[in-house]
Amino acid sequence: MEARENESVVEQVIAPAIKLRDWFRHDIQRPLENLVGGRKRLRVVALLACVLALDAADKATIGAVAAQLEHDLHIGNLQLGLLVAVSTGISAITTLPFGTLVDRVHRGKLLTIAIALWSLAMIAAGASVSYSMLLITRLGLGAVVAIASPAIASLTGDFFHPAERGRIYGYILAGELVGVAFGFLISGNVAAIMSWRASFWILAFLGFVLAVVIARMLPEPKRGGQNPIPDKTRQQDPKRSDVPDNEVEEIVEERDIEPHEELILHSDPLGMSVWGAVRYVLSIPTYRTLITASALGYFYFTGLRTFAIVFVRGRFDLAQATASTFSVGVGLGAIVGVLVAGTLADKMIDRGKLTGRILVGAGAYLLAAGALVPGLFTTSLWVASPFFFLAAAGLGGANPAVDAARLDIMHSRLWGRAEGVRSTLLYVFQAIAPPLFGWVSGRFGGSDGFGSSGSAAQSHASGSGLDITFLIMLVTLFLAGLVMFRALKTYPRDVATAIASEQAAPQDEKSKNRRDQHASHIA
């Protein structure tokens, strides 16, 4: 009798867990698998998205716990911005050498090591007893981004077909936005209930978990995009089975677009020196344009992300939890943007519009800038909300199109170093943004930007701090959109050049053998 009672108790305990598992598989996992094209593809997309989410959550957490940091550490806007700037600055210095490693060694192992070290630094950050100590611990947090950006670009190019990279990049970049939402909502509320230290420690724990999962579950694909993961849903649907794998190359061949003869690579670029690779990457006109546009766009996004919570609290007189929740709701627009824009860019290419990714990226930047103007002028939460939602969609939507376009114009064995070159400038702009936004808001808020009197909440309360700063800095978003239009003329020939280089630069046998030691086949 007692044994039966024990079995009954066990069943009562296990039954809800089984129902939860079945619900997750049926209502969450299967729809996502159908969306991305199969379980293996979903696993890769999810892991790469989580890497971006981790770093984004950290930077958003700084903004979410700004009030607690300002109070406990007696700091102002400028010091708050420096907490983001120092880690980003380290990324700017190290991303190019890490990009070189990405082109040569096992990318999953690099990500695992970087995330583990990042988690240790987060533990130390949460244990900081002074602003100086916290600032020093932030120096160690740049490693994950310095490796993540070139590694994700390289892995995406190798795992997925060129014609679908805009859509896939949208799914991956959604992870960055989910991370921002986590930082605003979860970390902000944890800080309100417990402390800002607990927010850092939770991120450290999640980092260790992610490092273990990547080490066990992320395969290493063949270099050059020669063995992409097949789309299972496409194979099962006869109506989709005839869609070509490389529509970009087909358009170039059909229109007989001539490459830049002087830029065609005739030898394996893996043998290039670091500076030789840098010179070659910067010699490609479209890549210079995309680097500039990305840097301008992320400059504004980084400043906005750092001070969004304190701006919303001061402008609309909201409590911490309410402001965090509102910011997450607005941030859903960015997720909508990355999903819609990436797919739209791919469909434009499918219809023969080779420059579709350029047009979508430029339009997204201009949408964000245009929507922010009325949103920043109004003092009504309900009036501002739809404008902020559209602005978030534009900020998010520019990235998948631009990122996919970068892969189109670069030899596959330069993807890591090319991303390192772009990220160096990108991180310099991201490092400058938070302290600059903080200093300018402090000046307009009636202080020099260094003292606690220049805190974000007080600046907003006076109506002359971050609101004016956000409006002034909007010029960078308009410039990002206008700069993108320059690529309409250069992009087709640069795509043709990359295709010609892939065909003309065979892999050096020694380099091939060295890479194959790290590569594993995807079943």
Image (tube, helix red, strand yellow):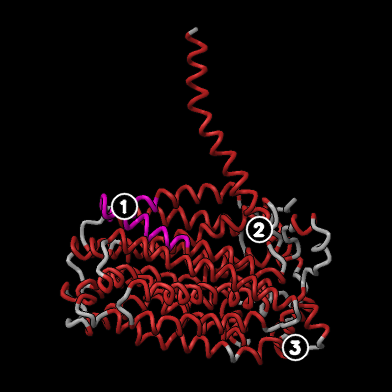
- What residue does disc 2 label? 35
- Residue plotted at (66% across, 53% down): 33
The magenta stretch spans which residues? 178-204
Q: Which mark is residue 190?
A: 1
Name the amino acid, label 3: Pro
Frontmost residue, 218 versus 390 = 390
Magenta stretch secondary structure, dominant? helix
Q: Are marks 1 and 2 in contact (CB under 8 Å)?
A: no
Rendered view: 501 above or below 118: below
Q: Position of residue 400 (x, y in %)?
A: 58, 72
* Numbered badge on residue 389: none
Q: Amino acid at mark 2?
A: Leu
Q: Residue at x 79, y 77 (%)?
A: 503
Within-10-Å neighbours for mark 1: few <14, some 14–19, many 20+: many
Separation of marks 1 and 3 at Cα, in angstroms? 55 Å
Q: Is residue 309 visible?
A: yes
Look at mark 3 in the image and give the residue it sits on: 259
> How far across and down, in percent of the image, does residue 10 sit?
50, 22
Q: Nearer the viewer, mark 3 or mark 2?
A: 2
Q: Position of residue 295 (x, y in %)?
A: 47, 81
Whether 192 is drawn above or below 21: the answer is below
Q: Marks 3 and 2, Cα distance to the nearest angstrom?
A: 35 Å
Element assignment for label 3:
loop
Residue drawn at point x = 41 percent, y = 63 percent = 328
